[in-house]
Image: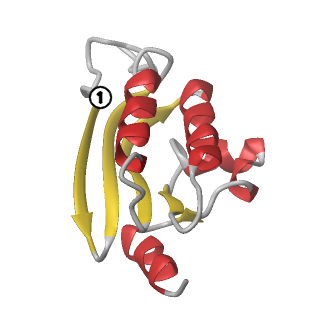
Amino acid sequence: MVDEPGDTANRAPFEVEQYETDGAVVLAVSGEVDMLSAPQLAEAIQTALAPKPAALVVDLTKVEFLASAGLSVLVNGQAEVSAPTRFAVVADGAATSRPMKLMGIDSLLSLHRTLDNALSWIAGA
């Protein structure tokens, strides 16, 4: 059997863990971000932005599939950010950064290969 995106038999569960590090709120996302889970990610981003943190980092390191619905959530999340909050996305690889680059979304978001790179970018602000 070939494992396809959206195949629920071998699918890692979608999860969002929120924590704080180095003055930033981090949303560590895992699993697949598709049309079913994208609303949960959008809600997590809105909840994290509500108290106006200094920075919000969406870490997609453990995301196995990123659909267009997830890309839209990230762009909308960036649009909801107001100063002085900074917004960054951690994504590296075929499942996450590649679709962002193909769609030109990397020019709209602050895209980083690692969480450390994102935190350094925030600290350098």
Q: Is residue 58 left or right of residue 104?
A: left
Front residue of 66/107: it is: 107
Render colour scheme = secondary structure
Q: Give percent across and percent down for residue 114.
A: 42, 68
As drawn, 107 above or below 15: below
Residue drawn at 62 percent across, 32 percent down: 72
Task: Give residue 122's position: percent from left, percent from top.
Answer: 48, 77
Looking at the image, residue 17 sits to the left or right of residue 92; the answer is left
- Please state if 84 lies on the left or on the right of 42 as rendered: right
* Residue 3 location (% of width, % of height): 38, 21
Residue pictured at 60% horizontal, 49% vertical? 78
Residue type indicated by callout 1:
Phe
Which residue does the image show at 26% across and 12% down from the upper left?
Answer: 9
Is residue 61 visible to the viewer in this orientation of the structure?
no
Residue at 29% x, 77% y: name it: 22
Q: Quadrant of the C terminus?
A: bottom right
- The residue tagged 1 is 14
Image x and y of residue 102, in percent: 74, 44
Q: Residue furthest front?
A: 51
* Total numbered labels placed on residues in the image: 1
Q: Secondary structure at mark 1?
A: loop
Task: Kindly indicate the quadrant of the structure image that contains residue 46.
Answer: top left
Up/down of 81 relative to 9, above or below: below
